[in-house]
Structure formats: structure tokens, C-alpha cells
Amino acid sequence: MSTISLFDPSKIGPLSLRNRIAMAPMTRSRCTEANTPNDLMVEYYSQRADAGLIVTEGTSPSPNGVGYPRIPGIWSGQQVESWKKITDAVHARGGHIFVQLMHTGRVGHPLNLPPGAEVLAPSAVAAEGQVYTDAQGLQDYPVPRAMTDAEVRHAIAEHVQAARNAIAAGFDGVELHGANGYLLEQFLSPQTNQRTDAWGGSVEKRLAFVLEVARAVAAAIGGERVGIRLSPYGVNAGMKPYDEIDETYTTLVPRLAATGIQYLHLVDHSAMGAPQVPEELKRALRKAWPRTFILAGGFDRAAAETALRDGRCDLVAFGRPFLANRDLVTRLQRGVALNAPDFATFYTPGPKGYTDYPAAT
């Protein structure tokens, strides 16, 4: 057991981080115009730049991947220019920031998509439940259209272009969203990927899309600027555990490592009611990953420092505590009580419950 602290400096590839605290990606739905970041988001992210690493909210690489109301994109020049204000503000405070590329796949609704976009997925299998739309409130998830081979390859190219756009916007790197039931995870699961071509039908083939996205993005911007988030046993957006789940991830992770990408961000959603990721699987994935390993999921300071000292990770990501505490790093370090998050304002437009949480005095 080491004596490492949450507040010790660390590195991600060439980046020197001031501490081992990451801000986890959290959808906040504040992009009220054309899926484009705004000045309110500049304030939000710069408030939290004391984190060693910020990972932004899920940001779509494609009009087809928007899914939810008011989430940001990074496919247009206007979006790139708007993100520059955010990266500049974070860097001015000494922080580092990766954009999370999130294509929602089947998890969306036509009412939430830009004109001409379409709900696409590996297979024509609808998610269970409903999704919120600004236009008509809650709506049943539609049956997505199964992607053609050409559309699968086009989605890979969209991730590559989005990664290049991210570097142009001043981001330190990109995180591929392979978790939470979105497009990359939809290819991994036999429940959502029922294809019989090169992109599905066996564990090996269901890994192909994720691996091709990782390889292509790493080739485009450098593997040291790329991470991926995974959530085995997660149940968001209608996902369910399946018989081959451990085999899927223990096969996937070494192959992802071989692409040269920098970090693996593993989230355990059991604190929010999902099945717990087995400790044996966590240990196996940690052992298989040669570079930066990030854990997320219900951590407080004591649990985070235990995980670091035990060598189970290199950084710990905090989600909701960062949402409600702009000065989370200071509060953790000083043992100051945390603000409680206001669930009613998680996804509402405007500053309330976003930039107005008080800092500790």
C-alpha cells in the first residue's frame, strides 16, 4: 500500500495534473441555441478548473447523435469557436479539459435532433421507457433504424472529425463515451447489437466498432490525447447485464490498450441502483491497462484515497459532488461540508442549479 494522496500531482500522457481528482462528465442541457456552447457554460467549467482533469458533458460528434434536448455538439465551425472560449477559460485557471464524445445512438427522439438527422443504432431495437423532449414532453423511445455498413463507417469518420475539431477548439484531448447505453456500448451488447455482418454476431465482432473508433481517433490526434469510458453492468437507457459481459470487457480492454489510447475511465453505477461491477472484473481490467486508470462511482474522499493507496486507480472521478460544489477540491482538502445537489435543476436552462451554487467561505 502506497502513501499516495488525492491531492498529489499526477500525469495523463504529456499533461501534468495538479491533483488526482477528475470531474466526471455530466449532461447539463444548457445549450439553448443550435447545440452550441454559450457563455454560461464558460462560467460553469471555469468555476471547476481546480480539478486535475475536467471531462465535459457528453458532446455529440454528429447531428444524428444528439439524442437529448440542449446538449452540445462539436461537428460545426460555430460549435468549435464556442468551445474555444471554454477551453481558454479552463486553461487560464491552470486546468486541463477533455471533451467527451457521446453519440447517443438509439437513445434519443426525432424531436430532439437537428433538421435532417435520424435516430440510428446497430440494430432496430428500441430502448425501454421514455425520453424527454422540449417540444412534447416525455415520449416513448422510437425504434431506431439499423445502420448500414456504410453508415457504421461514416460514424467512425464522424468521431475522427469531432476529435480533430476538439483539438482545434483547444481541448487537451477527447474521451470516447463507451458507457451508459450509448452508441459504442450498443455495439458491445448482444441485446442491442443483433447484426450478423462484420459488426456483430459474436463477442469478437461486437468489439469491432469500439476498437475501430479508438484506433482511428488515436491515429488522427495521438493516442496520448484519447481516453474511453466504460460501464460494465450499467443499466442506463435500458441496458442489462448479459451472459458474456465479463468476457466482452476482459477481451476488449487489452485490445483497447493496444490502440495506444491513454486512459480507461471505469464507472460503477451501483451507487445509483445498478448492479455492482464485480471486484474481480475491476481488478482484471486494472491489471490489463498499462496507462492511466480512472475509477468513478459514488466516491467520497476516504473511499477515493483508499482506492489510490491500494493501487486500484490513478485518478478518481467525482460527478454530482462537482455539480453542486464549484470548489470541490478545496472542500475535500479542508473537510468542509458539501452543498447538496438540486435534482430539479440538473437539466433546466439557465444559471439556477448550475453556476449559482455557493463556494465555501
Image: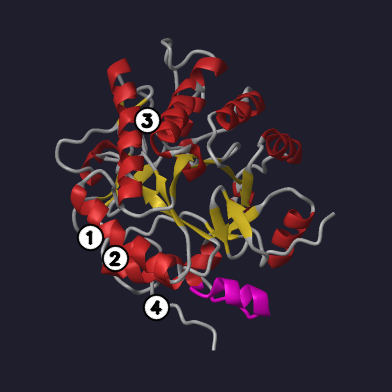
Question: From the viewer's perspective, is the residue at label 4 or at label 3 nearer?
Answer: 4
Answer few, some or many: residues within 10 Å of disc 2's Cα (few below 14, many 20 plus, some between 14 and 19): some
- Per the image, the residue denoted by label 1 is 32
Mark positioned earlier in the residue sequence (1 or 2): 1
- Per the image, the residue denoted by label 2 is 349
Q: Amino acid at mark 2?
A: Pro
Residue visible at 53% across and 29% down in the picture: 259
| C-alpha gap between disc 4 and disc 2 | 13 Å
Question: From the viewer's perspective, is the residue at label 1 or at label 3 nearer?
Answer: 1
Answer few, some or many: residues within 10 Å of disc 4's Cα (few below 14, many 20 plus, some between 14 and 19): few
Residue 255 on the magenta span? no
Answer few, some or many: residues within 10 Å of disc 3's Cα (few below 14, many 20 plus, some between 14 and 19): some
Q: Position of residue 88 (x, y in %)?
A: 35, 64
Residue 328 on the magenta span? yes
Q: Is residue 197 above or below residue 110?
A: above
Question: From the viewer's perspective, is the residue at label 4 or at label 2 nearer?
Answer: 4
- Per the image, the residue denoted by label 3 is 126
Mark positioned earlier in the residue sequence (4 or 3): 3
Q: Position of residue 144 (x, y in %)?
A: 31, 28
User: Is 137 or 46 nearer to us in this picture?
Assistant: 46
| C-alpha gap between disc 2 and disc 3 | 28 Å
Mark positioned earlier in the residue sequence (1 or 4): 1
For the N terminus, the image quarter is: bottom right
For the C terminus, the image quarter is: bottom right
Identify the secondary structure beneath mark 4.
loop
**Where are the magenta residues, as a range?**
325-339
Residue 318 visible in the displayed image: no
Q: Amino acid at mark 1?
A: Thr
Residue visible at 68% across and 36% down in the picture: 285
Question: From the viewer's perspective, is the residue at label 2 or at label 3 nearer?
Answer: 2
